[in-house]
């Protein structure tokens, strides 16, 4: 058996995929896995980490192996990995299957790489097709796309369903859900609903701000329970886990200035809804879109951006495209919005 197979068998892996919330959910799960053993390896689009400390490894699959090797040599037995759709399309889950696989949500993004939403979803599904024996699928039952993921999970694999009804009505009974979500500048409070996995109603506090992070928190709690981490331990730990950089990150006050990496129409709409709920003043949005990537979503970003009071269209890594053409494509979705500034 080669090194990859040996390491994949030795490391208890929680894999996370979806459109939005992957990095936040993976980072949170990595912190929760410390209740099993240390060090915990985590790999996200932000880099590779051991117990939250960045480590220098190559990019791609060689970097994943290097991070897992480093963790294993120090006695690590658990890992959290963010699986992108492009990596899954290239067969990553076949080489590194998960013990617990988490699906966050699916919306329009990365169609430059996948050409169709069907191919995009099918790529995500590979994480669940390749789930290890005795593995657990953690599915967002308030996202209708997860019902299709559920169909490819082997019948003998356990499922845990979570969800937040702000995304949609659940298509399956929820094991981890919320009866109430409230947030302010200090973070988000979630009241967990009683279920077969949550024996009593309890309050969950997370430092991240907004309903989308409440949804990510429910996914992380479900993954922790699937990983045999107790609810009490998971709830207590969650209160100490900060959101990764750029996730509704407040960088100034009076006026409040927030950085958010939202780059899909769904994520942008939810980010603006959070901003609107936090204050009574105007919401000013500064936005751009990357060049040579998913041109079809640019008008959709514009449509989502229309929820702001004032919109500043600017450049965001145009690569070899004309920045003005990118901005014009976003503006096409804004309709008759009165207050637009082009920089």
Image (tube, grey):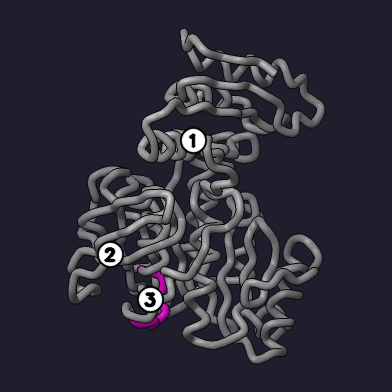
From where the camera sits, is residue 262 visible?
no
Q: Is residue 327 above or below residue 170?
A: above
Label 3 neighbourhood size at 10 Å, few (<14), some (14-19), many (20+)? some
Q: Does the stretch in magenta take in 64? A: no
The stretch in magenta equals: 222-230
233 left or right, relative to 245: left
**Residue 59: x and y, percent?**
78, 61
Residue that carries the numbered disc 2 in the rendered image? 176
Mark 3 against mark 1, which lies toward the viewer? 3
Q: Does the stretch in magenta take in 223? A: yes
The answer for how far apart the CA atoms under marks 3 and 2 are is 16 Å
Q: What residue is rendered at 63% in x and 50% in y? A: 86
Label 1 neighbourhood size at 10 Å, few (<14), some (14-19), many (20+)? many
Q: Is residue 231 above or below residue 164?
A: below
The answer for how far apart the CA atoms under marks 1 and 2 are is 25 Å
Q: What residue is rendered at 42% in x and 28% in y? A: 281
For this rendering, which residue is in front, 20 or 248?
248
Q: What residue is rendered at 54% in x and 72% in y? A: 30
Residue that carries the numbered disc 3 in the rendered image? 236
Residue 141 falls in image quadrant: bottom left
Mark 3 vs 2: CB contact within 8 A:
no
The local secondary structure at tag 3 comes to helix
């Amino acid at each position: 058996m080669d090194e990859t197979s040996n390491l994949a068998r030795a490391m208890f892996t929680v894999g996370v995929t979806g459109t939005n919330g992957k990095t936040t959910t993976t980072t949170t799960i990595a912190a929760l896995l410390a209740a099993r053993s240390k060090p915990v390896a985590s790999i996200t689009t932000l880099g590779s980490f051991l117990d939250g400390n960045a480590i220098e490894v190559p990019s791609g699959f060689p970097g994943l192996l290097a991070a897992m090797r480093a963790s294993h040599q120090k006695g690590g037995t658990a890992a959290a990995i963010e699986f992108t759709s492009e990596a899954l399309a290239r067969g990553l889950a076949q080489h590194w299957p998960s013990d617990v696989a988490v699906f966050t949500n699916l919306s329009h993004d990365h169609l430059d790489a996948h050409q169709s939403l069907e191919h995009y979803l099918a790529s995500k599904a590979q994480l669940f097709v390749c789930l290890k024996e005795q593995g657990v699928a953690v599915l967002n039952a308030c996202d209708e796309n997860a019902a299709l993921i559920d169909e490819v999970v082997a019948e003998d694999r356990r499922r845990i369903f979570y969800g937040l009804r702000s995304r949609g009505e659940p298509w399956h009974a929820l094991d981890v859900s919320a009866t109430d979500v409230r947030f302010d500048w200090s973070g988000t409070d979630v009241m967990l609903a009683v279920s077969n996995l949550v024996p009593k109603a309890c309050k969950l506090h997370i430092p991240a701000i907004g309903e989308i992070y409440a949804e990510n928190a429910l996914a992380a709690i479900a993954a922790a329970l699937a990983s045999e981490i107790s609810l009490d331990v998971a709830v207590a730990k969650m209160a100490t886990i900060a959101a990764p950089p750029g996730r509704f990150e407040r960088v100034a006050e009076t006026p409040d200035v927030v950085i958010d990496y939202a780059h899909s129409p769904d994520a942008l709409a939810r980010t603006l809804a959070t901003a609107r709920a936090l204050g009574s003043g105007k919401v000013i949005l500064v936005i751009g879109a990357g060049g040579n990537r998913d041109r079809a979503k640019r008008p959709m970003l514009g449509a989502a951006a229309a929820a702001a009071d004032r919109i500043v269209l600017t450049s965001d890594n145009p690569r070899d495209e004309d920045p003005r053409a990118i901005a014009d494509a976003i503006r096409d979705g804004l309709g008759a919005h009165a207050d637009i500034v082009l920089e």
